[in-house]
Amino acid sequence: CNNKAIIVSTWGGGLMYTSFPYSLLYEIIPVFWDSWPFNWEEQIYSLRRLNCRTCFVTSSQVAQRIKETLPNINVHWLPEGIDILDYVPGQDLTERSIEIYELGRQKADYHKILCDLKSEGIFSSFLCNEYDINGMTTKLAFPTAKALLKALPNIKIVISFPQVDTHPEKVGNIETLTQRYWEAMLSRNLIVGRAPNELIQLIGYNPVIDVDWEDPKKQLSDILLNISSFQKLVDRNYRTARKISSWDNRVKDIITILRTSGYEI
């Protein structure tokens, strides 16, 4: 085994590509993000081929699957993080002008509800991406990351669901925390939709208003009419995200785990 190691950040099926040429000289310690069933075989092959002893994965379910498939590898769940310095808390909810932003992938049945509510005049300011019949993005609500970062602090409600809810055919049963939730929490947006279990597990409470599927239209109308009553929740979410979400914290966790495992840093 090589007596020096290097950490390589990569997507689920990209380890062989991103580790070259470092794998010729170093032990590879992967940090996996975007690990989905469609690249599972390539991910496992790469870990075997490179004789990895340790790896980190941003999905707890994928981490468990790797443990079961390759029991000799030390696998650690590393929750998704974010650069907290990119985000600002903005004004309180009542002072914001953009009412609804459907962030990221859309849950089709709830998207229709949002469109109906807009048509009925329940709200007027509604932003979302646009897709063709094949699900390919045709227009982004915000064309650049800079535009999104500028707008987030002025948005009242962010709609967000885990990808397992919106595109189960792609992700199978893999449910994981993604950056979208941290973005909304750091911008003090009220999140409506569903929180991934990883997020609840990590912070110890549910930061999201779960959709009331019995009467989702009335629920969202009531939320907009009483938006100030959710200020304490978004303030709590902001404090929590500032404390927990930073990639700086994840790096500290990696260092601690590696030292405990016998690596010298």
Image: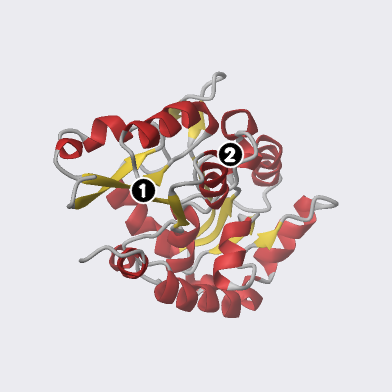
Q: Position of residue 18 (x, y in %)?
A: 24, 35
Image location (x, y in percent) of residue 218 = 79, 56
* Residue 139 visible, this angle: no
Q: Residue at x 16, y 35 (%)?
A: 24
For this orientation, the residue located farthest to the top is 134
Mark 1, Cα crowd under 10 Å, few <14 / some 14-19 / many 20+, is: some
Amino acid type at circle 1 is Arg
Q: Depth check: 92 or 73 in front?
A: 73
Residue depicted at x 64% and y 67%: 206
- Residue 41 versus residue 138: which sits nearer the camera? 41
Q: Residue at x 16, y 39 (%)?
A: 22
Q: Position of residue 98 (x, y in %)?
A: 49, 57
Q: Is residue 7 above or below residue 139?
A: below
Q: Give the residue at x 54% y 52%.
A: 60
**How many angstroms separate mark 1 from mark 2 (CA)?**
38 Å
The local secondary structure at tag 2 comes to: loop
Could you tell me the amino acid type at mark 2?
Gln
Quadrant in which the C terminus appears: bottom left
Q: Is residue 162 above or below residue 205?
A: above
Foreground label between 1 and 2: 1
Apparent side of residue 126 relative to residue 9 in the rendered image (left or right): right
Secondary structure at badge 1 equals loop
Residue 65's image quarter?
top right
Q: How many marks?
A: 2
Nearer to me, 108 or 9 = 9
Q: Residues within 10 Å of mark 2 (few under 14, many from 20)?
A: many
**Is 202 left, or right, of 252 in this rendering?**
right
Disc 1 marks which residue? Answer: 53
Examine the rendered structure and indicate whether residue 13 appears above or below residue 196. Answer: above
Q: Name the residue tied to disc 2.
A: 106
Q: Position of residue 63 (x, y in %)?
A: 51, 48
